[in-house]
Amino acid sequence: TWGKPAGTSPEVGHSCQLTMRLLLLAPGRAQTGNGTTARRIQDHLQAAGHVCILKDTSDYDSPLAISNLISSEKLEAALGIHLFKAGRLLQGSPIPFGIIFGGTDVNEDVKNEEKAQIMEKVLDEARFAVSFTEAMKEAAATYWPQIRINICVQAQGIVSLPNKQHNWAEFLQRAGISQDHRPLCLFLLICGLRRVKDPLYLLDVFSGQHFPIQLLNNTFGMDDTPSMAIFLDDWEA
């Protein structure tokens, strides 16, 4: 997508004729959305025939360190996830780069004047920016209207591979969930239980419906992303 006109979305799943050496720079902390997204993007790029080197932003403290990495690895282009955490390290990059909004950059970091100024400079240098949703694009354009035409909206998607051998009866028994023929409803929330996300607010919502609740954390494994399962007894739609 490096040479595409502004505002056009990157094509997903197409075969690339040129093999490139790419840097993918992202916050890599386990069980976070950005880290999981980065590994999925790396898999996609490598499946398309590219060499994609994934690096954690926390391992680098300056743009010079990234420039040295680019030189030593003979990298041709870069993609950063998170406008502040990755973008600040790509400032002055000797190779073209694009930025993927991470979420907290647009929703939280913009409230810090110093960070907001750095992010604006990064956007001035970036060849393009990617938002996963129209809402995030509009939020970014509110702060930086001059880059609206350079923001591509590319919705996230995953490949689901259900386990056909999974036995719900055995699973519920191991989890200590009663199976006495009462209606049972399962809600599965795939996320990390981090304070900044506060997914447990759902418990307050469900408890307000006066249904008995059983909460199982880290019950399911999907990639390295923890999940929360909420069981409601005596549920009626």
Image (cartoon, rainbow, N blue to C red):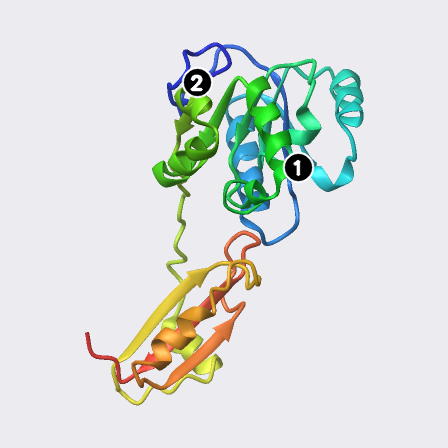
Compared with residue 168, is residue 11 higher up or lower down, i.e. above or below?
A: above
Pointer 1 residue: 114
- The reply, left or right, for residue 198 in relation to residue 159 is right
The percent coordinates of residue 6 (x first, y second) are: 41, 15
**Frontmost residue, 232 versus 50:** 232
The percent coordinates of residue 193 (x first, y second) are: 55, 64
Quarter of the C terminus within the rendering = bottom left
- Choose mark 1 or mark 2, whichever is in front: 1
Which of the 4 image quadrants contains residue 208?
bottom left
> Which residue does the image show at 57% across and 61% down from the upper left?
194
Residue 85 appears in view: no
Residue 42 appears in view: yes
Which comes sooner in the sequence, label 1 or label 2? 2
Report the label total: 2
Pointer 2 residue: 15
Task: Please tell me whether mark 2 sits on a helix, a strand or a loop.
Answer: loop
> Which residue does the image show at 80% across and 21% down from the upper left?
68
Compared with residue 25, is residue 48 higher up or lower down, i.e. above or below?
A: above
The percent coordinates of residue 155 (x first, y second) are: 38, 37
Q: Residue furthest left?
A: 237
Number of residues whose C-alpha sits closer than 10 Å to that of mark 1, classed few (under 14), some (14–19) or many (20 or more): few
The percent coordinates of residue 23 (x first, y second) are: 65, 25
